[in-house]
Amino acid sequence: MISMTILRMIRGRDMMSRKLERGFTLIELMVALVIASLAMVGIYRGYVGMVVANETQEDVIALNQSMRIVLDRMVDDIRLAGYNPQQVQVATGDPTIRFNNTSATGFSFRGDIRDLGRPVSIRTINYAIAPTGPGIFDLRRTESIPGALATTDTLIENLEVLDLVYLDDARNVLPPPVANPESIRSVQIALVVRVGDQDPTYSHDETYGNIQGILFPGYPKNDRFHRRCLTMEVKCRNNS
């Protein structure tokens, strides 16, 4: 009886040993390979998602910084519209030193922005948008000096909206082009700018408007671009 039990145990060990020696079957290897592949795909997608999210966040931060720099530049310029503390007389052309052209998407003015007190120091500053694609613009600033070539700088790209609202002393809205530019006492600015690259994980669903509460048409875009809208009101200290 004992010998039979021992014999069965030996045979069982032999069978287990043979199974171990035989290794994995082809089906088992294929199943393991599929599971490992699925795991690698998940890891790769997670990694790509993290990279895209990080790049997108950097783009949005850079966009915010660029927009604030542009707004600060516009604010500084608008405050100098009509600046002429030494009452310099313009020898030729339009003698007015104030806002000259005013539209909903740009303006120009004259002023002694260098405070030099000479006719040649009276400079004309012009802000205008230039189309670069369907619904996309560059915001450009041109500074011209009598007797010299004008210089133009692109302040920001991928601009979708530049909205300017002009107000008088009583805070009445002055329809552009403003008939009496000397009556402008403040300017409300609104900018909508998008990032350069699309984010495949994002769908745009926001609306934007100006300080008056008027919504800009065409939003939300329902595309993959992140956007930002900044607004500000500037007091005109020297325009008269």
Image (tube, rainbow, N blue to C red):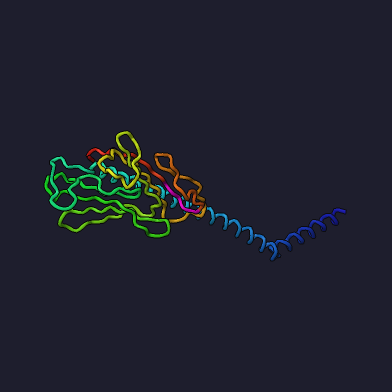
Placement of 41 over or under 164, stated as above or below: below
For the record, the magenta segment spans 223-228
Is 160 in front, or is 52? Answer: 160
Residue occupying the far right of the picture: 1
Please name the residue shown 34% across and 54% down the image. Answer: 129
Is 175 in front, or is 69? Answer: 175
Residue 184 lies in magenta, yes or no? no
Is 231 in front, or is 58? Answer: 231
The majority secondary structure of the magenta stretch comes to: loop
Please name the residue shown 70% across and 64% down the image. Answer: 27
- Residue 133, image x and y in percent? 40, 60
The N terminus - image quarter: bottom right
**Quarter of the image holding residue 33?**
bottom right
User: Would you say residue 21 is visible in this rendering?
Assistant: no
User: Would you say residue 155 is visible in this rendering?
Assistant: yes
- Residue 165, image x and y in percent? 35, 43
Q: Is residue 47 left or right of residue 89?
A: right
Q: Is residue 181 left or right of residue 36?
A: left
- Residue 82, image x and y in percent? 21, 43
- Residue 16, image x and y in percent? 74, 59
